[in-house]
Image (spheres, rainbow, N blue to C red):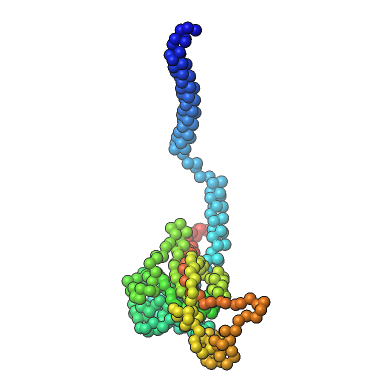
């Protein structure tokens, strides 16, 4: 005891050193055990890898062949059930420059008549007639074999989209934009998107982007979205932007209501001659009358809508080629 009292710091230090040494030995044994377990797991995985690398593929037999044929048939049946959901307007046969020009003229004319019949106002370019982004192609006489099919696809896509808009009776079509497919697709720049057409390398499905800007009320917008969903081609709305617009497609909403009665474009949509709207109290004086007590006010403002739409197309189903004729057996 006297010695411990005289050498107390040494004894305390020695006890601490022994405790630390014991803790270090315990920690080392634990890590050695974990290292041994990891080494055994690594050896097991290496053995499995070596077995897989050295394994020879099983020789084909009747069971393997039947299984592969069954899987191929299941995949073919699944694709057959999906294909009717991805309809697209078929391209005309024997497509050439003259056939495309004829199709372009007929499509533009039919869209103009449909817009006029449903009271949809179309843009009026300063340099001529609105051709639904195909102004350059109407003046062009020859087309390359690479751009002609793509132009035809885009023309039919624009036709399908415009049918949805015009059947929904939007007030005005402000503009359409599509992807440029050739060197002649440069003017006017407002007709073209900076996006590119894309194709899935596995399924072969192609995506064609478009943008349309139109003016309408909220009810017509609902009809447009419903029409896009129920259309035969696969029309996917990627984005929608809604802002204050006008009933006649002008940039100012104040231009939607002229000084004398209903807007002429709206009056023509409902078969009213000019002046009849004000005669029946539909002009500014009638608009100033507020709702009766207890009635909910109806304040549906004209809106300007920008839709970005992707048209999804599947590649045509390959036609099975006839196999070589079997030689006739000799009698």
How many marks on residues? 0
**Which is nearer the eye, 288 or 42?**
288
- Tell which of 161 and 258 is nearer to you: 258
Residue 271 seen by the camera: no
Q: Which residue is drawn at 35% across and 73% down?
A: 189
Is 43 drawn above or below residue 105 in the view shown? above
The spot of residue 290 in percent (x, y) is 60, 81
Residue at the (40%, 65%) spot, across then down: 195
For this orientation, the residue located farthest to the left is 183
The residue under the point 56% across, 49% down is 67
Residue 275: image location, x then y, percent: 53, 92
- Dividing the picture into quarters, in which one does residue 222 lie? bottom right
Instruction: Specify the farthest residue to the right.
Output: 294
Picture coordinates of residue 323, whole percent (x, y): 47, 60
Q: Position of residue 327 (x, y in %)?
A: 48, 59
Q: Is residue 230 above or below residue 46?
A: below
Q: Residue 4 vs residue 285: left or right?
A: left
Look at the image and tell me whether residue 49 can be seen: yes
Residue at x-position 54% and y-position 58%: 76
């Amino acid at each position: 005891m006297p010695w411990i009292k005289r050498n107390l710091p040494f004894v305390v230090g020695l006890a601490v050193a022994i405790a630390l040494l014991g803790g270090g030995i315990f920690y080392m044994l634990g890590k050695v055990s974990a290292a041994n377990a990891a080494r055994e797991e690594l050896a097991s995985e290496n053995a499995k890898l070596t077995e897989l690398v050295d394994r020879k593929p099983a020789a084909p037999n009747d069971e393997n062949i039947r299984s592969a044929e069954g899987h191929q048939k299941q995949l073919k049946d699944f694709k057959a059930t999906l294909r009717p959901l991805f309809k697209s307007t078929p391209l005309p046969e024997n497509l050439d420059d003259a056939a495309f020009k004829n199709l372009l003229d007929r499509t533009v004319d039919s869209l103009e008549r449909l817009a006029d019949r449903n009271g949809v106002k179309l843009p009026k370019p300063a340099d001529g007639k609105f051709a639904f982004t195909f102004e350059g192609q109407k003046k062009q006489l020859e087309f390359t074999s690479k751009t002609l099919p793509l132009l035809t696809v885009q023309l039919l896509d624009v036709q399908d989209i415009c049918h949805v808009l015009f059947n929904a009776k939007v007030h005005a079509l402000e503009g359409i934009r599509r992807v440029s497919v050739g060197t002649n697709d440069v003017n006017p720049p407002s007709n073209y998107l900076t996006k590119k057409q894309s194709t899935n390398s596995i399924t072969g499905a192609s995506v064609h982007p478009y943008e349309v800007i139109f003016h309408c009320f909220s009810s017509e917008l609902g009809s447009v979205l419903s029409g896009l969903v129920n259309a035969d081609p696969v029309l996917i709305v990627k984005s929608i932007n809604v802002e204050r617009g006008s009933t006649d497609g002008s940039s100012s909403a104040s231009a939607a209501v002229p000084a004398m009665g209903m807007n002429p474009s709206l009056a023509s949509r409902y078969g009213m001659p000019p002046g009849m709207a004000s005669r029946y109290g539909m002009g500014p004086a009638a608009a100033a009358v507020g709702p009766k007590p207890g009635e909910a006010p109806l304040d549906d403002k004209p809106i300007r809508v920008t839709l970005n739409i992707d048209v999804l197309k599947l590649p045509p189903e390959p036609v099975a080629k006839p196999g070589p004729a079997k030689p006739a057996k000799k009698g």
